[in-house]
Amino acid sequence: MQRPQQAAKPHDRLAEALAEDMNAVNLLIRERMASQHAPRIPEVTAHLVEAGGKRLRPMLTLAAARLCGYEGPYHLHLAATVEFIHTATLLHDDVVDESRQRRGRPTANLLWDNKSSVLVGDYLFARSFQLMTETGNMRVLDILANASAVIAEGEVLQLTAAQDLRTSVDTYLQVIRGKTAALFSAATEVGGVIAGASTEQISALFTYGDALGVAFQMVDDYLDYAGEAGVIGKNTGDDFRERKLTLPVILAVAKADANEREFWARVIEKGVQREGDLDHALALMARHDTLAATRAEAQHFASKARTALAALPAHPLREMLGDLADYVVARTA
C-alpha cells in the first residue's frame, strides 16, 4: 500500500489510509441508492454522490472507528449512513436556497426539478435509517437520528434568523452547529461508539467533530466573500445575494454606524440589491476587519478540535485528523 504521507493534503492522506474501507463504503452507497421502480432516484443521487466531493464525513466515521481499534464490518454502514444524510440535506438545501450551482456543477433541482430533489432527499433519509438499524446498536441509532433532527432544526432557525439584523453571534453558532457541525460530531461519535471506545474517548470524538464542523462552516462563510469562484465551487457572494446573515456580515452589522446599518437593512432585510452593493459590502467588511475576525474564530475552533484528540490513542490516523483541523483554516490562506 502506498504510504499515506506521500499525499500532500490531510484529507488526501486520510483517503489513502482508508482507501480499502472507502471503496467498500462506495460500493455500499451505490447498492443502496438503487431503486427498482424509480430510476430517477439513482440518477439524481449519482449527480451529487459522484460529483467529486471529498467524502469527508464518512471518512471521519471510518477514521474514528479504526483509531479506536474497531475490526468489525458496521463502520461501513455508518459511514454510508452519514453520506446519505449529508446528500439528502444538500438536495433539500438547494431547493430551499434556490441554488443553481453545487461543487461547480448545476444543482439537481436545476437539472431536474424541486419535486425530484425533495423526494429523492426523503428517499435517502429513509435509506440512511435502514443502514444504521442494520448495526443493531441502539446508541448509534439515537445519535444519528438526533443529528438528523438537529440539522433540520438548524435549517429552520436559519430561515427565521437569516434576514434579521438582530441575529447575534450566538444564534449564528446555533445555526451552524445544527446545519453543519451536528453531522460532523455524529460522524466521529458513532465511530467511537461502534468500536466500544471509552466514555472519555467518545466524548473527545464528539468534541473534535463539533469543533471541526464549526470551523469548517466558518471558513465556508469566509470564502463566500474572500474566495475565488473556481475554487469554492459556487459564485463568490452567493450568501450576500441570498441575504444570509453569516459571521462576516453579523460582525460588520455589530460595528456599523447609522449609514452602514441603513445599507445592511436595505440589502439584507429588505432585499433591495443594486449593482455595486456587493463591492460596498466587501468594503465595509474590510473597514471593520470582519473577514479576519471570522478567520480567527475559525482558527479557535480548529485548535479546539486538535486539542480534543489528545484523549485518543496515539495512531497515524490521529495525526491526520489533527492536520485536517489545521488544513480547514489553511484554506483561507
Image: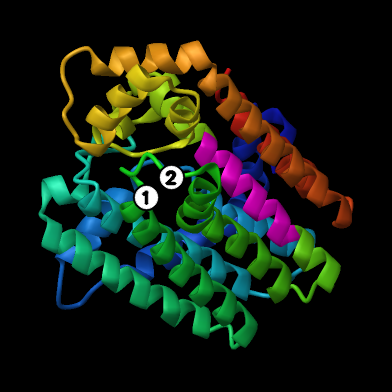
Q: Residue 115 location in percent, x, y?
A: 12, 63
Q: Is residue 167 left or right of residue 290?
A: left
Q: Residue 128 location in percent, x, y?
A: 42, 73
Q: Is residue 182 left or right of residue 322?
A: left
Specify the segment rendered in magenta. 205-218
Label 2: which residue? 167
The front one of 252 and 322 is 252
The amino acid type of the residue labelled 1 equals: Ala
Hey, which quadrant is residue 105 in on the image?
A: top left
Q: Residue 32 location in percent, x, y?
A: 36, 71
The amino acid type of the residue labelled 2 equals: Thr
Q: Earlier in the sequence, mark 1 or mark 2?
A: 1
Does 309 sit above or below residue 219?
A: below
- At x 12%, y 46%, the residue is 111
Proximity of marks 1 and 2: CB atoms separated by less than 8 Å: yes
Does 259 sit above or below residue 106?
A: above
Please tell me how crowded label 2 is: few (under 14), some (14-19), or many (20+) other residues with Cα within 10 Å.
some
Residue 80: which numbered mark, if any? none
Q: Is residue 104 visible?
A: no
Q: Secondary structure at mark 2?
A: loop
Q: Is residue 251 left or right of residue 98?
A: right
Label 1: which residue? 161
The front one of 26 and 131 is 131
For the N terminus, which image quadrant? top right
The front one of 285 and 303 is 285
The front one of 291 and 78 is 291
